[in-house]
Amino acid sequence: MQNGKTALVTGAGRGIGKAIAVRLAAAGYFVIVNYNGSREAAEQVVEEIRSAGGEAEAMQCNVSSYSDAEQMINAIVEKHGSIDVLVNNAGITRDTLLMRMSEDDFDQVLSTNLKGAFNCTKFATKYMMKKRFGRIINISSVSGVMGNAGQANYSASKAGIIGLTKAVARELAGRNITANAIAPGFIDTDMTAVLGDNIKEKVTETIPMKHFGKPEDIAETAAFLASDGASYITGQVIAVDGGMSM
């Protein structure tokens, strides 16, 4: 059953973004499955949602582009009337040690992960403020909370997401708009699949629950933050990491 609300999930063609899109669709949202280069994957997510009785459509946009993000948000509102939930999930990695990290490695990660969240938030909240309702859910990372060797760029972008979340939460609370961040730990996705078995074993030893999480663990948290049950929660960072960052 549809709830009459629209949710935009950026980077929703796979992994955590896909799981969030599927979960929000199950909760009754019309879901915009955003992608940049992976059109086929995004359309598969849409098909999965529709097969389960939900409603969704895929929409291409490089969120790191200020003008492209504005066009996407405007197109969504023109077609669907509102954006009620924004999930800033789009992210990339360019992992290497600081001494080997190029300027481009740093700039690309910050541009997609942090500036992309700023772009979408700025344009979506214009409409949320008029409606006096909105839920902003930003996907940070345990790397943004604790730091991680070989991820100076990624950690900086995800720590920046936390600062952005708190600032937006303070600015917009009076308009009934909440902003919260989720900080996933090590989750079974394509991003962690490339890790060698030795690295996975070492990482698992640092996790009190002794196993990686699933994308659905993040999706459940996102669905809660989007719900009426979370209407008095804002400016928070919820770690979904098996206890890794405590």
Image: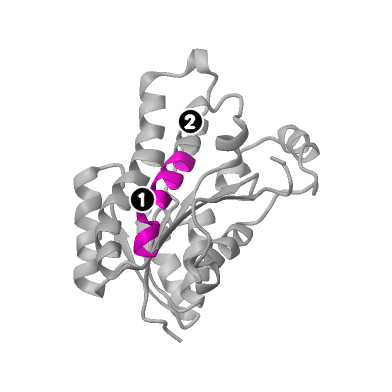
**What amino acid type is highlighted by mark number 2?**
Ala
Q: Is residue 47 above or below residue 142?
A: below
Q: Is residue 169 magenta?
A: yes
- Residue at the outermost top position: 99
Q: Residue at x 29, y 58 (%)?
A: 124
Instruction: Name the quadrant containing residue 218.
Output: bottom right
Q: Amino acid at mark 1?
A: Glu
Can you tell which mark lies on residue 171?
1
Residue 136 at least partly seen: no
Mostly what secondary structure, the magenta segment? helix
- How packed mark 2 is, by other alpha carbons closer than 10 Å (few <14, some 14-19, many 20 or more), is many
**Which quadrant holds residue 109?**
top left
- Would residue 192 be found to the left or right of residue 132 on screen? right
| Residue 69 seen | yes
The percent coordinates of residue 85 (x first, y second) are 40, 65
Image point (36%, 50%), residue name: 171
Question: Which color mode does the image show?
Answer: one colour
Compared to 115, does 39 lie above or below?
Answer: below
Element carrying mark 1: helix
Local crowd at mark 1 within 10 Å, few (<14), some, or many (≥20)? Answer: few
Left or right, 75 with reference to 99? left
Q: Secondary structure at mark 2?
A: helix
In the rendered image, the quadrant that contains the C terminus is top right
Q: Earlier in the sequence, mark 1 or mark 2?
A: 2
Which region shows up in magenta? 161-176
Image x and y of residue 185, in percent: 64, 45
- What residue is disc 2 on? 156
Residue at (47% x, 65% y) in the render: 21
Q: Is residue 210 above or below residue 135?
A: above
Residue depicted at 30% across the width and 61% down the height: 59
Q: Residue furthest front?
A: 174
Q: Nearer the viewer, mark 1 or mark 2?
A: 1
